[in-house]
Image: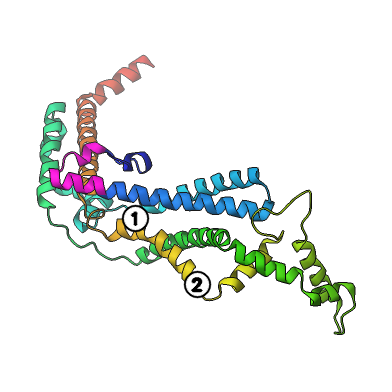
Amino acid sequence: MNLGKYIFGIREEYILRLEQEKREEQFLSYNILAAMFFVLVALASLSGFCFGLVLFQSWIISFILGISFASISFILLLLVLFLNMNTNDGALQGKMNDFEAYYQSIKEKRFESVTDEEALTIISEHEQSLRTSNAEPQKPEFHISQLFITSTKIVLVLVISFIVANGIEMLMFQGKMNDALLIIKNSNEIKKVVSGTTDLQVNYDIKTNAQWTLNMLTENPSEPFILINSYSFLLNFEILNLCLGRWKIVFDLFFAILFLIPFILVKKSSRFAGGGYIKELMFSHISTTLLFRILADRKCAEIRKELEAIDYDALLIKGIENE
């Protein structure tokens, strides 16, 4: 079973070229990766649904928001995953990134006159040569731009994980949050500040804030509370931080690690970056590029011969006579 085909577009024909043991290993690896990716998107959908309930107090809008956030997360996470899905073989990377230099190093004169059958034979032999010569991966060279690219990808994943973490935390600790909000709502000090019967000296801003807090915590019959007993998202977020305390950092770190695991595996694991599927994919891409380059050179050679066979002097004389 190839779950990766439905999420990452994994092409089975490349995996089927591998030996039986490596083939099973690659199918298992990408199935696990697909399952992890599905879990992350499901968490994003649940988080978006929870945010919808907190912000809009509406089941329909919450459902739409959950699907929308899951779709956005799916696209962004898939983008980061594809950017990480590269071989750890420096030699293959060099051939892909600077194919022109590689082509010049293997170019032969016969490329300009080969038939289609001969071109396919050359490509088949070249692909087998790549497979043999790159059996042991070479360490890729470090470039300073990798720091910027990697940092950007990590920040993007961490932002998504932070959003998801807060939505899930509000769902998990809604009871504790509602108890804290109820204590605030029933606070005698706030009621006295609003009614103006407190013994403390309060200015207009404090009274306004107290009135706003009570308004946010007072349920409107036409828009009843669903998840959190408050209409203010910022107040809910502040209460969440107060309720969890230091455990808020622990939960945020847990979700950050959970979201980073698939991308670290794809980047560093020998089953992905050093796996047979990525190598076979690169062998095929390099060979296909080489095939079209050979056919292009052959066509250029044919055009060059036709141009060289033209008698330009005769054409010039004929043109003058016609005038």
* Relative image position of residue 210 (x, y in whole percent): 80, 71
Is 198 on the left or on the right of 60, as rendered? Answer: right
Between label 2 and label 1, give the one nearer the viewer: 2
| Rendered location of residue 276, percent (x, y) | 19, 48
Q: Amino acid at mark 2?
A: Ile
Q: Is residue 21 magenta?
A: yes
Residue at image point 46% right, 48% down = 74
How many numbered circles are shown? 2
The magenta region covers 12-28
Q: Earlier in the sequence, mark 2 or mark 1?
A: 1
- Categorize mark 2 by other alpha carbons within 10 Å: few (<14), some (14-19), many (20+): few
Corner quadrant of residue 188 = bottom right
**Does 299 sit left or right of 162 as displayed?**
left
Q: Is residue 11 above or below residue 38?
A: above
Main SS of the magenta part reads: helix
For disc 2, the marked residue is 249
Q: Are marks 2 and 1 in contact (CB under 8 Å)?
A: no
**Residue 57 or 312: which is nearer the viewer?**
57
Q: Which mark is residue 84?
A: 1
Amino acid identity at mark 1:
Asn
